[in-house]
Amino acid sequence: MNNKLKGYIALSRIISTFPNTLVITLVAIAITDGYFGLRAITIFLANWLFLISIYAINDVEDADDDAQEPSKAKRNPISNGSLTKSEGYLYTLATGVISLLLYGLISFYVGNIQISILASFGLIIGYLYSWKAVRLKSIPFLDILSHGFMLSVAQFLVTYFTFTNNLTEIGITFSIALFLISIHGDLENENRDFDVDRKTKIKNTVQLIGNLRVSRILQYTFLVFTSIFLIYSLACMRIKIDYYIWLSIIAGILISVAVYFKKIKKISKSYQEIVELVLQYVAFGILIVYILLKGG
């Protein structure tokens, strides 16, 4: 495979961006009682390119810092020389523009300008999060707040408004749950990169706290509140066969733990990946229930 092509694939972070986008998009479609068709495919592609663009600019802007960490330098295609910064910026711009065009198309089709506004705002926040002239990721509190919105809530809400204009209690509680789990993920990253961030003089929330034990407690607190809002969201659904949901949750946890400890398919030891895997199984469990109900 061409080295440039490998670089663009690495810049897209398909292993992370594809399943995360798929889960958030499908959950939003299911909650709004949407359907699988051209509209669903279009919003998924828009969401995927949206996330790819945000991840791409992060790799471009962090290339010099990542070059100081062997594992990151190997993964980052700008740091390892597979792509130039100019190529990285061009790819970021291209994926971002295409995603906004798709959002605009959907906004026009369903007659809801909120979709384009939310998507544009999310993309701008995503760029400012990494762009060194601003670098929200290096500003305490703004780092976790921007991360919480751009990597989950924005995608969820634009999909939600693609199928309905009515933001219900379920939509609000799911948005909060996604926001909190994304903050948890950011804190996990900042805890993991504590030494590297200190070396590269990144001043984020965990660096401000300055104590890994305290920041871990904060991280787990967000996870607890995520669980509370997620469970409340499930309760709000008021469907008769809710035991199927609980079975899917239990199955997701058991499968995730089994995959982790058996190290199947080179699953990373990162706690964040375990959490994400569990949530993905939970989300798919919810989707299966909805599909069964619709089929009935």
Image (tube, helix red, strand yellow):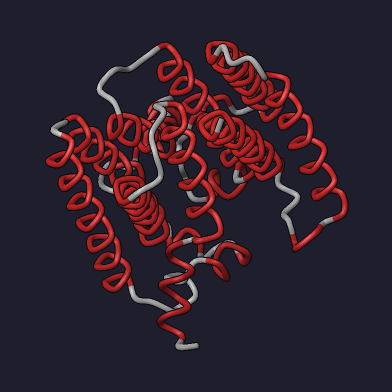
In the image, what residue occupies the spot 25% across and 53% down? 99
- Residue 150, by quadrant, is top left
Front residue (pair 101, 128): 101
In the image, what residue occupies the spot 53% across and 36% down? 186
Residue at far bottom of view: 2
Q: Is residue 131 visible?
A: no
In the picture, measured across the screen, residue 93 lies left or right of residue 231, that is left
Residue 240 percent location from the top left of the image:
63, 14
Front residue (pair 270, 79): 270
Residue 119 percent location from the top left of the image:
25, 39
In the picture, measured across the screen, residue 289 lies left or right of residue 26, that is right
Q: Is residue 195 visible?
A: yes
In the image, what residue occupies the spot 85% across and 46% down? 258
Up the image or down, 72 lies above or below 162; here it is below
In the image, what residue occupies the spot 54% across and 54% down? 16
Residue 266 percent location from the top left of the image:
75, 62
Residue 68 percent location from the top left of the image:
54, 63
Q: How many marks?
A: 0
- Residue 155, by quadrant, is top left
In the picture, measured across the screen, residue 30 lies left or right of residue 129, that is right
Task: Give the quadrant of the C terminus.
Answer: top right
